[in-house]
Image: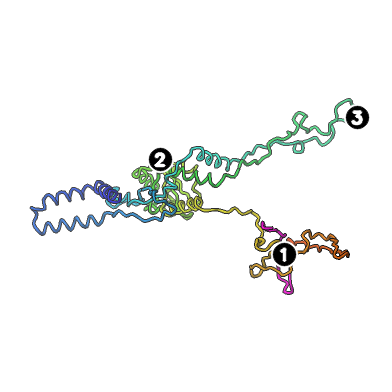
Amino acid sequence: MALSSFRAITQGLFRSNPCVSCQSQILYRSKATLPDNQENDSLSSLSTMHQMLPRPHFPTRPLPFLCDDEKPRKCWLETMKRSKEGSSAGERLGLIDLHPHIFEYSPRTDIIWENIRWQKNYRRVNYEHAQDRYEKRGGGHKPWPQKGMGRARHASTTAPQWRNGGRAFGPRAPKSYFRDLPKATRVNGLRGVLTYKFTQGDLHIVDELDLETDNPQDLESLAVERGWGVSALLIHHEDRLPPNLAVATSQLFNFNVMPVYGFNVFSALKHDALVLSLDALNTIEQKLLQFLNTNEIYYPTNTPMAWPDPAIHGQFKHKTFEDQDWDIEEQHLQMPFFPRGDGRVKVTKKGGEQKKVVDPIPPAPKTAWHQVGEEARWVYQYEDIESESN
């Protein structure tokens, strides 16, 4: 695979620069008829021209969580810099490996559509507002007396049953249509979009997302040479964009630049081509693989500052404010001799004599910072939670 790819790259380079190939053919054909000094000059000039051409390289990328029978996908590594000869010899630098769990995923159109609908509803706000009976103008007095008129009782002319009155249960602005989407659905949507772009040939990986000039026409001509289509979405690895790229894209409506943390399904499908920098590709793969291969524990949103230790059965556990360390006091290590602990009186008979034992009431848990001990340390105490073993 590597040898065939290397041959394809070298053949593409020589086709893009016909003067080198023609000169080499002429040199090899007339090698026997040339004098020694002319032959050496021609060979030296040919070697210098070969050195000027960019050599193909294959950057190594770590691809974790791969099985033995899984092979990485291959993609061209391109550059946004033009060659000095004016040809497209420096368009492709080499081949890189893509993770098959992300770029060889079986996409589902229903999950992709769910992501698009979620993003559309995320920014949808209904500003329709209907006035109720208290917001309508007028109606500060009764239209007629309560009794003696033979009419129905009314308190105000702004009631919903009156003409031009307030509306009951009408739309109240602003109304948001936001809803939370499961993280697995968002991740699978991104995997499906990346697979679509890679399969259709609309995914382009560049070494650096930077332009030589800040002229918008240069960016448009570069897109035509690279075959990016009418519109392109460029993903940078950070939110501080290169100056030339920021100036060039600010004057164009069909070229948008986005940091890697803003990459989404809707923006990727809205553009014809998806251009990723090499650092942005590494970040996207790392984030997606971390979610796909991590046993994530969902803790409650309002977690207490100190959790009870399961090894201590039914005891309190504290977290000090100064040293941020666990602190267990002696009085909490002693279990009450009666499990109820509600202050009831227990009567026992031993040898014909009745003995009354009062079950002590444990101290009420304090759910705020309070001072404990002679040193008056500030401690946050929580309620007692018994372990599963009890």
Q: Residue 376: say if magenta.
A: yes
Dot 1: what SS? strand
Q: Nearer the viewer, residue 215 or 360?
A: 360
Q: Nearer the viewer, residue 16 or 330?
A: 330
> Bounds of the magenta span?
368-390
Residue 33 is situated, as x and y percent measured from the top left of the image, at 8, 52
Q: Quadrant of residue 310?
A: bottom right
Residue on which disc 2 sits: 230
Residue on which disc 1 sits: 369
- Establish if 125 lies above or below 27: above
What amino acid type is highlighted by mark number 3? Lys
Real-space CA distance between mark 3 and mark 2, rounded to the nearest whole angstrom: 76 Å
Can you tell which mark lies on residue 147? Answer: 3
Real-space CA distance between mark 1 and mark 2, rounded to the nearest whole angstrom: 62 Å
**Colour approach in the figure:** rainbow
Q: Quadrant of residue 153?
A: top right
What amino acid type is highlighted by mark number 2? Val
What amino acid type is highlighted by mark number 1? Trp
